[in-house]
Image (spheres, rainbow, N blue to C red):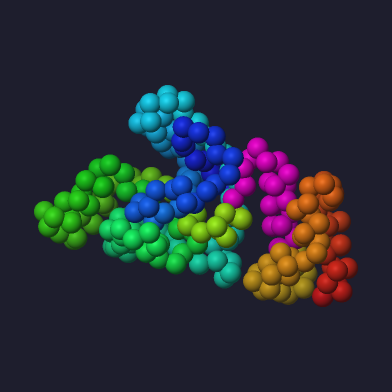
Amino acid sequence: MRVYHGSDINIEVVDLSKCQPAKDFGQGFYVTKYLRQAEEMATRTAKLHETFTPIVTEFEFNEWVFENKNFQTLRFDGYNEEWLDFIILNRSNQSPAQAHTFDIVEGPVADDDVTKRIYDYFRGDVSKAAFLEELKFKKPMHQICFCTNRSLRMLWRVEDKAEVKIMHIASDIIKRLETEHGLTETIAYNLYYGSTTYQRLIDESSGLYLQPWTEIYQLLLQELGKI
């Protein structure tokens, strides 16, 4: 999946320690699948910081991670009570520690209008039932938050063409391990990422990533003793 981050700087390396805490899904690196939304965020950020240089950084994201049991993930399909409770949990958290243990969270954005109503809810000016009724008529904006350093392994800058290619190789090989050898996704994932073949692959100086993924798959099978 192609995703975007809007800011006023070019993101070379994601540093979670520099991300603001107490946001919708906690402290983390936020992206969206909507380019226009990222562009608007970049413009807004550039004006706020008075840099006036909006920049959108493009990434590739391994969406199948949501099915991988090695990662703790959470997805909200839209505005609902669970989403609201989760937003309030994170917005209310003043501790440096994360208020939850998820690696990746996906769901709607609490934009300015929603945030205002959250404050009204905090003050008791609007009930939860009334707030949720209002949200039914709001078109959701989209965001994915990468909350842990391990989750960032599923995100690659588009400019880093070698890394993007390696990501696609991983997806193809893991799917082939599942279909040809009857492995669960978790087992296939662990075999692949724990292999010497993978270590060679991510060493760009080896040039292995330039080979067809089917040849890399055969090298992996040889290493694993044909499973």
Quadrant, the C terminus: bottom right
State whether the magenta stretch is mostly helix, strand or loop. helix
Q: Position of residue 161 (x, y in %)?
A: 71, 41
Q: Is residue 176 visible?
A: yes
Where is 29 relative to 51, above or below? below
Task: Indicate the quadrant where residue 125 lies.
Answer: bottom left
Task: Indicate the quadrant where residue 46 lies.
Answer: top left
Front position in the image: 55 or 173: 55
Front position in the image: 68 or 49: 49
Residue sitting at 87 percent across and 74 percent down?
225
Query: Does the segment drawn in magenta span residue 126?
Result: no
> What is the magenta range?
155-175
Residue sitting at 54 percent across and 34 percent down?
10
Question: 125 left or right of 63?
Answer: left
Outermost residue toward the top in this view: 52
Q: Position of residue 208 (x, y in %)?
A: 84, 51
Question: 226 left or right of 151?
Answer: right
Residue sitting at 16 percent across and 51 percent down?
120
